[in-house]
Image (spheres, rainbow, N blue to C red):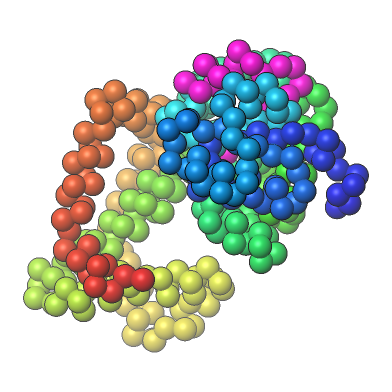
Amino acid sequence: MQKDQLLIKEKKIGIIGYGSQGRAQVLNLKDSGLSVVCSLPSQSKTALKAKEDKISVLDNKDLVIESDIIVLLTPDETQGKIYKNDILPNITKDKLLIFAHGYAVVYKEILLKDNIDVALLAFKAPGPVLRDNFLKGINTPSFYSIKRDVSGNCSKLIEEYSTLCGSKYPLRFETTFEEETTANLFSEQTLACAGITGIMKTSFDVLVSNGVSPDIAYFECIHKMKNMIEMIHGKGFSEMYKNISNVAEFGDYYARDKLFQGSLHKSMQEIYNNIKNGEFHKAWQKEQEEDFPLMNKTRKEDSRHLSEKMFDKYGE
């Protein structure tokens, strides 16, 4: 990709938000020679960080007016209000609005204008990893979707933005807003968050309740997971099995049905259905309206879990 021939070199990019993902994208684009600014609330703790990084900080309204490409990288629950108050009144024809997650659009918290380009670009790495990969020249996977291409340049701009931010073919995959949202929520609720943490905590609790030392239980049920995931991530399940003992492999096959008893697929299907039919969205709206009772309660309970003391002792 010849940088002097890039369409995006002519564009000013404005990123709303300077958190983990926002900072990584701003710095990667800046290092790629692009014109980029960010916007933050005046009281934001990250405003100082942006200034230390020598990034111009605007308010949302001015950023939308001055930028050709607007990237919304704030928490999902804030996006509807930001779009209504700051983006909708100020964005003009043929500008490009990029989302990192389709949630607010899919669940109609944002109703898009007809005369602007709209796209999704979701990097499949936390901000610090995206930044570190960029600095090391490592390609980061990403998902993209072109929802509306009024200008005729949306696809080209997304390809260039993605490449200069650290993700290129063959690890850039086309999707839709709906598919990305469903898959992301589903993986969080069944595996990446609830699944992994739930299995680790439960196995830890069972060992401790049966007289095993919390230290031993920690290393067997929690600490070990990093090595297992790294083996799977690098070579796949079959290679992981080649690197564990025969008794460990047999134990997998012996206990698999006993552990899940055929109910895991049913439970996951129910979670998937609740995402698709809007039940999860309703529950999330209710959680926000009531000032996060479930989140506050669970955070407090989790902070008292015995495994947290093991993290204090042995965590990196």
Q: Residue furthest top?
A: 89
- Is 96 within the magenta? yes
Closer to the camera, 51 or 39?
A: 51
- Image-quadrant location for residue 70: top right
Closer to the camera, 27 or 315?
A: 27
- Image-quadrant location for residue 144: top right
- Decide if residue 126 is in sight here: yes
Q: Position of residue 194 (x, y in %)?
A: 33, 51
Q: Position of residue 236 (x, y in %)?
A: 54, 70
Q: Residue at x 73, y 28 (%)?
A: 68
Which quarter of the rendering shows the C terminus? bottom left
Q: Residue at x 57, y 25 (%)?
A: 60
- Image-quadrant location for residue 129: bottom right
Q: Is residue 256 left or right of residue 135?
A: left
Closer to the camera, 222 or 310?
A: 310
- Is 129 within the magenta? no
Q: Residue at x 52, y 16 (%)?
A: 85
Q: Position of residue 295 (x, y in %)?
A: 26, 39
Q: Position of residue 96 (x, y in %)?
A: 71, 28
Q: Residue at x 66, y 59 (%)?
A: 134
Residue range of the region highlighted in magenta in the rendering: 81-101
Q: Is residue 301 above or below residue 284?
A: below
Q: Is residue 247 above or below residue 173?
A: below
Number of numbered discs visible in the structure rendering? 0
Q: Is residue 163 left or right of residue 274?
A: right
